[in-house]
């Protein structure tokens, strides 16, 4: 998926949220004058998507977090001077730190974890988050009552979860890390077959 497709998908979600920030709002919040550094290329998870081509001089992280990882994120936010945030609250939250950086985030409970969208021009925060070993819930935690063998094709909420929540995490792992993950979390044979069927070949 291209960056532009990713951005359009995100803005589609924001537009359906009653308290959404518009693209114009974000462009005003993250003007070019606020940008002092760039992430550069990185394969870390969660990926930081550059929004500057859309006139928003910031980066966006969009991730599903397992239980407990929300505390890692709050700790990283606090360490960079962003305090007073509450996850699963209504609407977007905007914060500024003493260094002049800005962030806005939206979060909700979804797929057995915390769905977090975070936009910021704080490179230090982005790097701290990528160094925090964040992970989504396992497939069986996201879909505790589903038999993966019954899904012949991806559609609806399953397609959304796979494409935007699970696959970015999975693709970031090496083959050995994937093997270790499946063993460490005792992923069932059904889910292993599901992942093998739908994951792109390397």
Image: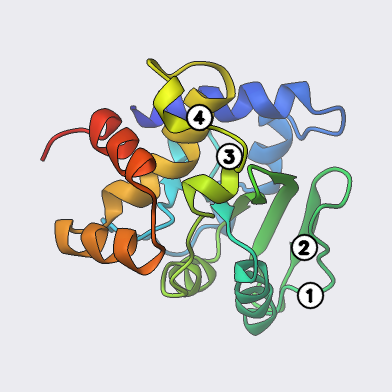
Farthest residue to the bottom: give it: 79
Q: For mark 1, give the secondary structure.
A: loop
> Which sits earlier in the primary sequence, circle 4 or circle 3?
4
Labelled pair 4, 3 in contact (Cβ < 8 Å): no
Crowd band around label 1 with a 10 angstrom C-alpha radius: few (<14), some (14–19), many (20+): some
Residue carrying label 2: 95
Q: For mark 3, give the secondary structure.
A: loop
Crowd band around label 2 with a 10 angstrom C-alpha radius: few (<14), some (14–19), many (20+): some
Distance from the alpha carbon under mark 3 to that under mark 2: 33 Å
Labelled pair 1, 4 in contact (Cβ < 8 Å): no
Name the residue: 55% across, 58% down: 121
Q: In which quadrant will I find the C terminus?
A: top left
Q: For mark 4, give the secondary structure.
A: helix
Residue carrying label 3: 143
Labelled pair 1, 2 in contact (Cβ < 8 Å): yes
- Position of residue 94 in the picture relative to residue 202 (left or right): right
Residue carrying label 1: 83
- Mark 2 or mark 4: which is in front? 4
Q: Position of residue 8 (x, y in %)?
A: 53, 22
- Position of residue 187 in the picture relative to residue 138 (left or right): left
Distance from the alpha carbon under mark 2 to that under mark 4: 22 Å
Name the residue: 32% across, 58% down: 182
């Amino acid at each position: 998926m291209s960056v532009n497709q990713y951005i359009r998908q995100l803005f589609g979600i924001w537009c359906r949220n009653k308290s959404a920030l518009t693209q114009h709002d974000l462009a005003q919040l993250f003007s070019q004058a606020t940008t002092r550094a760039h992430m550069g290329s990185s394969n870390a998870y969660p990926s930081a998507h550059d929004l500057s081509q859309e006139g928003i001089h910031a980066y966006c992280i969009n991730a599903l977090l397992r239980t407990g990882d929300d505390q890692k994120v709050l700790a990283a936010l606090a360490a960079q001077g962003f305090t007073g945030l509450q996850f699963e609250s209504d609407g977007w939250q905007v914060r500024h730190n003493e260094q002049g950086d800005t962030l806005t985030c939206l979060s909700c409970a979804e797929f057995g974890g915390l769905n977090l969208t975070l936009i910021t021009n704080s490179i230090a925060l982005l790097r701290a988050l990528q160094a925090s070993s964040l992970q989504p819930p396992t497939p069986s935690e996201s879909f505790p009552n589903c038999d993966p063998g019954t899904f012949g094709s991806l559609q609806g909420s399953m397609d959304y979860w796979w494409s935007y929540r699970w696959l970015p995490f999975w693709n970031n792992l090496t083959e050995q890390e994937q093997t270790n993950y499946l063993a460490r979390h005792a992923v069932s044979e059904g889910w292993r077959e599901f992942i093998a069927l739908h994951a792109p070949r390397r």
